[in-house]
Image (cartoon, rainbow, N blue to C red):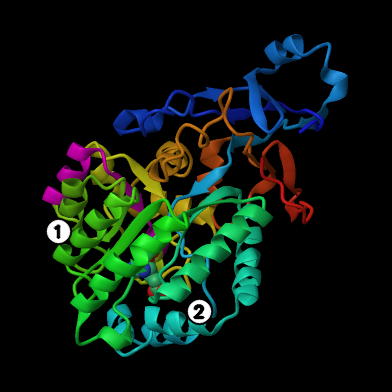
């Protein structure tokens, strides 16, 4: 790269989350953030080169300090760039009308069954040009950056036809190349049964398996395969067929499970060896045990529960049962139109009984594992990507305690500033290594 090195100096807390690159953190492990006081980091060639107390790094780099850009992080909290492992980033339009209907008593599933919900966004996404989808999603990515997020997972699932699913995935790929935020793609053709197949959902399942999955895999457009396993959407049997079929193409299973009703989705995640099960508001005790026994990461979405006015998943119980827990926004136009991982962390504490340390582990290293990136991102360790967020708070507890405020001061992606003093500063040129 040949760019100037960057040295962050003297953070009041440098939260490294060191030592969990191979497997996600569980139980007490989630409480051990590995904090360095007066911490400093040397970044070069897009990589974290050295991490330690300021005096150590000052000594180690004394002959090269003049070459580097120096950032004084006195009084600030420095963490790994936040990772959002579950979003529906690429979509068109908004659904504030449904929000208003829900405030007057309509339920999420009623709205969907009457042709709204996912179907409404599917119509808007089918009608949108690639350019529109790109521009709308890019704005969201800038907002993610402003909230300290440097990597997001993005699902398709608002096409529900081969052509439009491919369109969404291609836009995600173009955004990955054009925008500093890294995007990891998931195919979710089984997000809803499209109106055309309402009377014959198995026929749609066959299309997902026989037409969509092979083409997505052939074009290398996704790493994961996800299904909305929910009563009235896809049954556990249909979900299993789709996820097992994806495995044959090397697509790793994920599952939207037990969101609205208990439906043995968590049990299925354990049975098929999914990397993660998501939502889990209504997961059974048996299901929670299945996640723990099989090392399935629970991706919890308290912003969705909040926005749907539902009781959150029992994050506390899951952690105490040994389930590795990650957090995510679920960013989508229906059940969680937010880009704020800091808000999601606040809700993790206030609505799911998680501690400030646990929510930070869940939004960084465990979130990275949920998208199979534990070795590259999610902690501040030598050799990892230089993705770092600086918050204008003195410690990680204040980040949770002063809720409802965006405390992000700066964001560094691949060793370069992309947010400075709360403003996006990256140039339009691609910045990926
Ligand atoms: O994760 N539950 C299914 N899918 C999304 C919502 C999608 C939508 O309403 O547009 C979710 O909540
Ligand atoms: Fe979702």
Kindly report the distance in space between the C-alpha atoms of the residues bearing marks 1 and 2: 31 Å
Element at label 1: loop
Q: Which of the pair 96/203 is nearer the observer?
A: 203
Specify whether 151 is left or right of 262.
Answer: right
Q: Badge 2: few (under 14), some or many (20 or more) residues near its Cα, within 10 Å? A: many
- Quadrant in the picture for the N terminus: top right
First-in-chain label (1 vs 2): 2
The residue carrying mark 1 is: 264
Residue 173 against residue 100 in the figure, above or below: above
Q: Which of the pair 124/146 is nearer the observer?
A: 124
Q: Position of residue 238 (x, y in %)?
A: 18, 66
Extreme-bottom residue of the structure: 114
Residue 278 appears in the picture as rendered = no
Q: Badge 1: few (under 14), some or many (20 or more) residues near its Cα, within 10 Å? A: many
Name the residue: 46% across, 54% down: 220
Name the residue: 52% across, 71% down: 167
Residue 108 against residue 63 in the figure, above or below: below
Q: Position of residue 259 (x, y in %)?
A: 27, 64
The residue carrying mark 2 is: 125
Q: Which of the pair 383/39 is nearer the observer?
A: 383
Mark 1: C-beta under 8 Å from nearest atom of ligand 1:
no
Q: Are marks 1 and 2 in contact (CB under 8 Å)?
A: no
Q: Which mark is residue 311?
A: none
Q: Quadrant of ligand 2?
A: bottom left
Specify whether 58 is left or right of 323.
Answer: right
Q: Nearer the viewer, mark 1 or mark 2?
A: 2
Instruction: Indicate yes or no whether the magenta region holds residue 242.
Output: no
Specify whether 181 is left or right of 309.
Answer: right
């Amino acid at each position: 790269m040949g760019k100037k090195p960057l040295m962050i100096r003297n953070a009041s807390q440098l939260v490294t989350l060191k030592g969990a690159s191979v497997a996600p953190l569980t139980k007490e492990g989630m409480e051990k953030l590995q904090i360095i006081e007066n911490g400093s980091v040397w970044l070069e060639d897009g990589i974290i080169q050295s991490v330690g107390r300021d005096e150590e790094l000052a000594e180690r780099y004394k002959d090269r300090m003049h070459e580097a850009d120096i950032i004084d992080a006195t009084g600030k909290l420095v963490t790994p760039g936040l990772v959002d492992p579950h979003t529906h980033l690429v979509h068109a339009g908004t659904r504030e009308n449904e929000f208003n209907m829900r405030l007057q008593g309509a339920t999420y599933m009623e709205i969907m069954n009457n042709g709204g919900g996912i179907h409404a966004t599917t119509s808007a996404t089918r009608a949108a040009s690639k350019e529109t989808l790109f521009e709308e999603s890019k704005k969201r990515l800038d907002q993610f950056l402003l909230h300290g997020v440097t990597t997001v997972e993005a699902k398709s699932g608002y096409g529900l036809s081969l052509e439009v699913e491919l369109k969404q995935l291609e836009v995600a790929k173009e955004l990955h190349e054009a925008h500093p935020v890294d995007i990891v793609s998931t195919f979710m053709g089984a997000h809803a049964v499209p109106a055309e197949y309402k009377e014959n959902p198995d026929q749609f399942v066959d299309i997902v398996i026989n037409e969509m999955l092979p083409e997505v895999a052939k074009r290398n457009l996704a790493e994961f395969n996800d299904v909305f396993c929910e009563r009235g959407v896809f049954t556990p049997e249909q979900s299993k067929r789709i996820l097992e079929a994806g495995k044959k193409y090397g697509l790793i299973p994920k599952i939207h499970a037990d969101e609205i009703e208990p439906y043995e989705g968590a049990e299925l995640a354990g049975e098929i060896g999914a990397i993660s099960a998501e939502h889990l508001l209504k997961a059974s005790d048996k299901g929670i045990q299945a996640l723990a026994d099989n090392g399935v990461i629970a991706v919890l979405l308290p912003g969705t529960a909040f926005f749907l006015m539902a009781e959150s998943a029992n994050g506390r119980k899951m952690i105490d049962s040994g389930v590795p827990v990650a957090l995510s926004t679920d960013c989508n136009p229906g059940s969680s139109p937010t880009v704020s991982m800091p808000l999601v962390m606040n809700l993790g504490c206030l609505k799911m009984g998680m501690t400030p340390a646990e929510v930070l582990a869940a939004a960084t290293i465990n979130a990275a594992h949920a998208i199979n990136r534990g070795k590259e991102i999610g902690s501040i360790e030598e050799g990892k990507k230089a993705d770092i967020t600086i918050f204008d708070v003195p410690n990680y507890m204040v980040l949770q305690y002063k809720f409802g405020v965006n405390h992000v001061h700066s964001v560094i992606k691949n060793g370069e500033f992309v947010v400075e003093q709360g403003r996006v500063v990256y140039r339009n040129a691609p910045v990926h290594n």
